[in-house]
Image: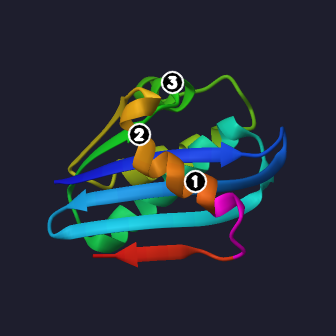
Amino acid sequence: MLEIFVDGASAGNPGPSGIGIFIRGEGHLIHIAEPIEPTDNHLAEFLALRTALQYAQELGTTFIRAFSDSQVVVDSFQRRQTKNKHFRPILHDILTLADQFDYCFVEWIPEKQNKAADQLARRAIHLTERHVRKQ
């Protein structure tokens, strides 16, 4: 099982943005800080989850337990819908990816339990290219 912690950050609304992903399990310990196009914080949170699931797919896992401090992302994933037209295409991508795993759960956690992903997302705002560190 992979445990994946995701976060999105924006310095403005919209503004410079980044995503942070921390993956552990199945012999992996991966830190990803990736700058994204300027956007708002909510959209960055959705993009972080989509990117994390893409990475998990590349790792060949079948069981994912993902964590986000974004209630909007978690609720949308669990209900499999969103009323926000800007989030719909990304949620569709997320659900399509999630359905390819045997098990894929996304759970809400408080911000204080998501510090690794938060720090990576904040760092990504200041990067010009993706930074991946594997241990």
Which residue is located at x 27 percent, y 66 percent?
Answer: 29
Q: Amino acid at mark 1?
A: Ala
Reading the chain from its start, which is encountered first: label 3 or label 2? 3
Q: Residue at x 66, y 35 (%)?
A: 42
Residues marked 3 and 1 touching at CB (< 8 Å): no
The label nearer to you, 3 versus 2, is 2
Disc 1 target residue: 121
The residue that appears at 51% across and 46% down in the rendered structure is 118
Q: Is residue 31 visible?
A: yes
Coordinates of residue 57 in the picture (x, y in percent): 34, 66
Which residue in the structure is indicated by mark 3? 71
Q: Are marks 3 and 2 in contact (CB under 8 Å)?
A: no
Q: What x and y, as percent, mark residue 5?
A: 38, 47
Residue under numbered circle 2: 114
State left or right for residue 45 relative to residue 74.
right
Amino acid type indicated by mark 3: Gln
- Residue 109 horizontal/vertical position (percent): 37, 28
* Residue 90 visible from this viewpoint: no
Magenta stretch containing residue 125, yes or no?
yes
Element carrying mark 2: loop
* Rendering quarter of residue 35: bottom right
Residue 112 location, x and y as percent? 41, 31
The magenta stretch is 124-128
C-alpha distance separating marks 3 and 2: 13 Å
Judge by depth and name the residue closer to the eye, 70 or 75: 70
Find numbered disc 1 in the image and state the secondary structure of the residue it sits on: helix
Majority secondary structure of magenta residues? loop
Q: Residues within 10 Å of mark 2 (few under 14, many from 20)?
A: some
